[in-house]
Image (cartoon, rainbow, N blue to C red):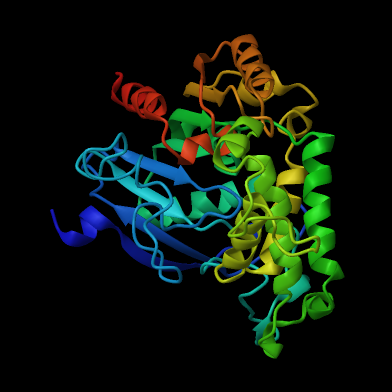
Amino acid sequence: MSDDQRFGLSRHATLPGPLALDGGVTLSPVEIAYETYGTLAADGGNAVLVCHALTGDQHVASTHPRTGKPGWWTRMVGAGRPIDPARHFIVCANVLGSCLGSSGPATVNPATGAPWSMAFPVITIRDMVRAQAMLLDHLGVDRIVVVGGSMGGMQALSWPATFPARVTKAVVIAATARHTAQNIAFHEVGRQAIMADPKWRGGDYYSSGDPPAAGLAVARMAAHITYLSEAGLTDKFGRRLQAREAKSFGFDADFQVESYLRHQGLSFTDRFDANSYLYITRAMDYFDLAEEHGGLLANAFRGTPTRFALVSFDTDWLYPTAESRIIVHALNAAGAAVSFVELSSPYGHDAFLLDAPHLDRVVDGFLRAA
């Protein structure tokens, strides 16, 4: 096996389109940045599509070109891992609207020769899935197993609802079939933080070289809190002070947790685009799989041949276990094959990205099952 097959081959595709979007407009051409690992089997039956979360990207198991950090899911994807390039042909694509090479507000609008900015059309999770389907057509992949957590789990649900004949198995981790009012509220706080930054300039900040980093950092800080758990934060930080013996009686980062959040916010601005954050959070807020199928979630899966595995975490309060159970009940009502497990973890929503050996065994077992 070549180094590219082991460690990932970064690629870029310009797909002619047009891609019809849920918002009523079309996008053409469609740019998709992606990575592949492994080799597609002669019968095409070993393809695994890995879908990333809100702030993720195509670098699932290879070094990130901007940060130099390892891929975001090396614990799950790689040699000897549940998703293994020795057994699978693995595809991970940067979602539509993002900022790592796929069509989005930071890419060039062919009609103007300048970045799309806020002229880029508003997109949905289903639009992301349709773009991925175009990419798989380009790669000659007809059937897939789809795996994703968080927003990636939304895509993993939308795939069999949109292209049922193409999905043999779907692994849906720490996800939901629709955004609740609380989910939308947290996202709106982040969007308003970005748009209140004077450097946002209505989204036209690309030529200035001075993006709304402060607003994006605050948005990331607010969102990051929802990815963690009370127990995890208490265990890691408690009320411990940051590099000082006593409170400053000012507004510097007195507490370790404050310093941690500031670091998370600032480091995020080095690798992500503020406008992309607006577009992707809006896509997540619009996601409502039942609404897309006549108001009944079971309708999304009627007659589906896909086998489903759903996983939740007991400390995830962003997409709690109750949300997964709603999906399981709908799958049961549709007569779909589904298995479900709630795993225990102190890490909250982000558990699927962290040390969760039980998750590894669940995914590995499900993928290996006939």
Q: Is residue 184 above or below residue 246?
A: above
Give the farthest residue toward the front.
245
Q: Nearer the viewer, residue 287 or 218?
A: 218
Residue 98 appears in the picture as rendered:
no
Q: Is residue 261 above or below residue 309?
A: below
Give the x, y percent position of residue 223: 70, 49
In the drawing, does residue 139 fall left or right of residue 233?
left
Q: Is residue 293 above or below residue 354?
A: above
Give the x, y percent position of residue 367: 34, 27
Residue 192 appears in the picture as rendered:
yes
Residue at 73%, 71% in the rendered image: 214
Q: Nearer the viewer, residue 345 or 19?
A: 345
Q: Nearer the viewer, residue 162 or 33?
A: 33
Give the x, y percent position of residue 30: 56, 66
Give the x, y percent position of residue 253: 69, 60
Q: Is residue 1 above or below residue 195?
A: above
In the drawing, does residue 308 fall left or right of residue 60?
right
Residue at 64%, 81% in the rendered image: 110
